[in-house]
Image: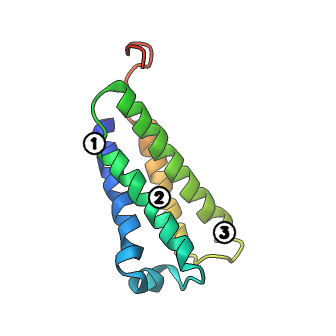
Amino acid sequence: MNPVVLSRVHGLANLVGGLWPLLHINSFEVVFGPKTDRWLVKTVAGLLIANGLTQLSTSSSPASIRQARRLGLGTASALAGIDLIYVPAGRISPMYLVDAALEIGWIAAWLRADMPDRFSAKAE
């Protein structure tokens, strides 16, 4: 898969995922369960928006693609890890297992993306 397209699609997903609880916390809580620390939900939402906007700005330069890949893998890994630790512990809704599956999908997509040869690029 083209990594620029992947970055932009993943970025859009992160942007929407971050905007949702900020724009309509009630519907977010219907899906993912009530939150006692809404400030934490808003903090994660802000980080997802920042990550999404960064991913949306990916260019076709090798350096930009590598940065997008690191951000995409890091974001998806962190979210999947939290989901897979705290659902079994009973701390968050089982609905987060759906999110974990989506995040694992992003990880797989990034691992399969056509990445530029790191040795053919000029020094960054």
Contact? badges 2 and 1 (CB < 8 Å)? no
Which residue in the protein does label 1 denote? 5
For label 1, count other residues whose C-alpha is less than 10 Å away and answer few (under 14), some (14-19) or many (20+).
some
CA–CA distance between discs 2 and 1? 21 Å
Residue found at x 50% / y 60%? 101
Q: Quadrant of the N terminus?
A: top left
Mark 1 and mark 3 lie on one chain; the one further toward the N terminus is 1
Q: From what the image shows, is residue 53 above or below residue 95? A: above
Can you name the residue that lies furthest to the right here?
A: 89
Residue found at x 42% / y 31%? 66
Q: Nearer the viewer, residue 104 or 78?
A: 78
CA–CA distance between discs 2 and 3? 20 Å
- Give the amino acid type for the residue marked by disc 2 in the picture: Leu
- Give the amino acid type for the residue marked by disc 1 in the picture: Val
Front label number (2 vs 3): 2
Picture coordinates of residue 9 (x, y %)? Answer: 30, 51
Q: Quadrant of the C terminus?
A: top left
For label 2, count other residues whose C-alpha is less than 10 Å away and answer few (under 14), some (14-19) or many (20+).
some
Residue found at x 66% / y 69%? 86
Mark 2 and mark 1 lie on one chain; the one further toward the N terminus is 1
Q: Nearer the viewer, residue 68 or 46?
A: 46
Picture coordinates of residue 55 (x, y %)? Answer: 35, 46
Picture coordinates of residue 89 (x, y %)? Answer: 72, 72
Which residue in the protein does label 3 denote? 86
Which residue in the protein does label 2 denote? 47
Picture coordinates of residue 80 (x, y %)? Answer: 56, 58
The quarter of the picture where residue 58 lies is top left
Q: How is the image coloured?
A: rainbow
